[in-house]
Amino acid sequence: MPAPYITINIEPSGSVSAKGASDDLSATLLKHAGFQQIEDWYGRRHRLPTTTPQADRAAIATHAAEMLRAARYSIDLDPDLDTNRLTAPANPLGPYAAGAEILRLTDQIRAAENGADLVQAVDHLLHPEHGALERVREALEAAGEQITDLDDEAYGLADRFGFAAEFVSTAQSELVGAEVELHRVGDSQQDQVKARTQPPALPGSRSAALATSPAAAKAKVSSALGTGAPEVGAAVHPSQAPGSRTR
């Protein structure tokens, strides 16, 4: 006899329920995982208590599904309750949240496509009040002070943290005004690309310009009229003057 087909999903009301566990073994496994058994006119059902924390619902449902699958039950688990299908944790470095944030910032810097993108990313490092370097400098300085407060004899170790804080401060001073220069990163390459893509001047451009000069234009007009009239300002022979008679 095939094992029952069990469905674990999120109902429209938001509660998590398991349906199809009609035999005692599957019911026992669900109750062991944390589900409560309900028997009414719908039949035997299992549901997580309404007091179950939101963060625990997926873990309990996934655990129940794993136990049922190990017992050879066919399970249909809601993807939103399957911790194996959920996305990777927001912090890939575990408890080192600050390091993970710097890692994300490093990826953003590497993905910058122009100077403006680079400035936007680097600003999270160099901002004089809220940047990562300033936070690191403060943390190192605070660590040195705390060491002194906890142990007067550990002044050597405290000094090392103080020196490290000064090194970070020196790095901040070295990079003052870097944002302005970052804005110009890539500009020279863009100018070179424009120069290479700009179409060259046509070979006949100079002759075309000469052909459209005022003198050439007058010559074209005279030729078109066909009157043979002299140009304005040209000397006229007396024999050609209007009203002249031939002797």
Image (spheres, helix red, strand yellow):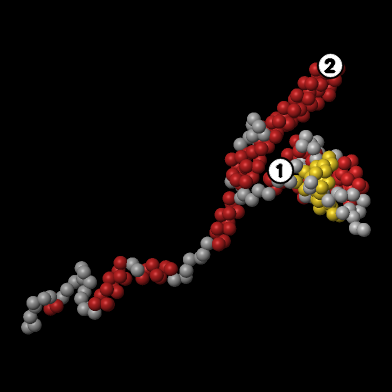
Tag 1: residue type?
A: Ser
Q: Would you say 219 lies left or right of 206 here?
A: left
Q: Identify the residue shown where x is 17% and y is 73%.
A: 236
Residue 85 image point, x, y percent:
79, 50
Residue placed most toward the observer, 78 or 223: 78
Q: Identify the residue shown where x is 64% and y is 50%.
A: 113
Please tell me in which quadrant of the rendered image residue 121 appears.
top right
Q: Check disc 2 and report its element: helix, strand or loop.
A: helix
Q: Would you say 12 lies left or right of 64 here?
A: left
Q: Would you say 85 lies left or right of 230 here?
A: right
Mark 1: few, some, or many residues within 10 Å (few <14, many ≥20)? few
Tag 2: residue type?
A: Asp
The quadrant in which the N terminus is found is bottom right
Q: Identify the residue shown where x is 83% and y is 40%.
A: 36
Instruction: Identify the mark at residue 152; answer none if there is no mark.
Output: 2
Residue placed most toward the observer, 193 or 25: 25
Instruction: Identify the mark at residue 13; answer none if there is no mark.
Output: 1
Residue placed most toward the observer, 122 or 224: 122
Considering every residue shown, the one lying at the far top of the view is 152
Measured Cα–Cα span from mark 2 to mark 1:
61 Å
Residue 26 image point, x, y percent:
89, 48
